[in-house]
Image (tube, rainbow, N blue to C red):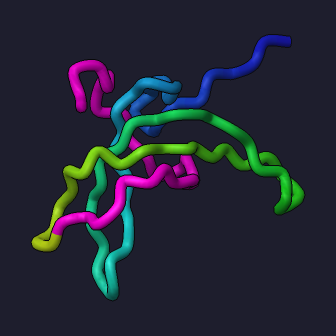
Amino acid sequence: MARTPLTDFTGAEIKPGKLVVYATRRGNRVRQTEATVLETKTNRKAGRVVPVLTVRPTGRESGISARKTLVPRTIGAEHVVVIGDAEGQA
């Protein structure tokens, strides 16, 4: 049996090297953050298989104040949208 590719709600495949946007919290507000996918994984701790992503923020995001760190993060894959390839990004 072949492994089903991980996709966003538009049907675009989420894989390492893709540029994605996801929601993050800053204080009591929510902002959109752009990031590059480093790795796709699954989390089985909740008793079911949940896809998760390891991403590295690019530093571009909505909001007034700038992001302080570009450390890789692990996020859930359910509310992520692919916006392109990360090639050409610094």
The part of the chain drawn in magenta is: 66-90
Which of 34 and 49 lies nearest the eye of the viewer?
34
Which of 53 and 50 lies nearest the eye of the viewer?
53
Asked whether, in this view, residue 46 is left or right of residue 4, the answer is: right
The x and y percentages for residue 13 are 49, 24
| Residue at 45%, 39% in the rendered image | 9
Give the number of marks: 0
The x and y percentages for residue 39 are 59, 34
Which of 50 and 58 lies nearest the eye of the viewer?
58
Query: Looking at the picture, does residue 89 appear above or below residue 80?
Result: above
Which quadrant holds the C terminus? top left
What secondary structure is the stretch in magenta mostly built from? loop
Asked whether, in this view, residue 76 is left or right of residue 21, the answer is: right
| Residue at 26%, 64% in the rendered image | 67
Residue 72, magenta (yes or no): yes
Asked whether, in this view, residue 12 is left or right of residue 6, the answer is: left
The x and y percentages for residue 5 are 62, 22
- Outermost residue, bottom side: 28
Which quadrant holds the N terminus? top right
- Outermost residue, left side: 64
| Residue at 59%, 30% in the rendered image | 6
| Residue at 76%, 50% in the rendered image | 43
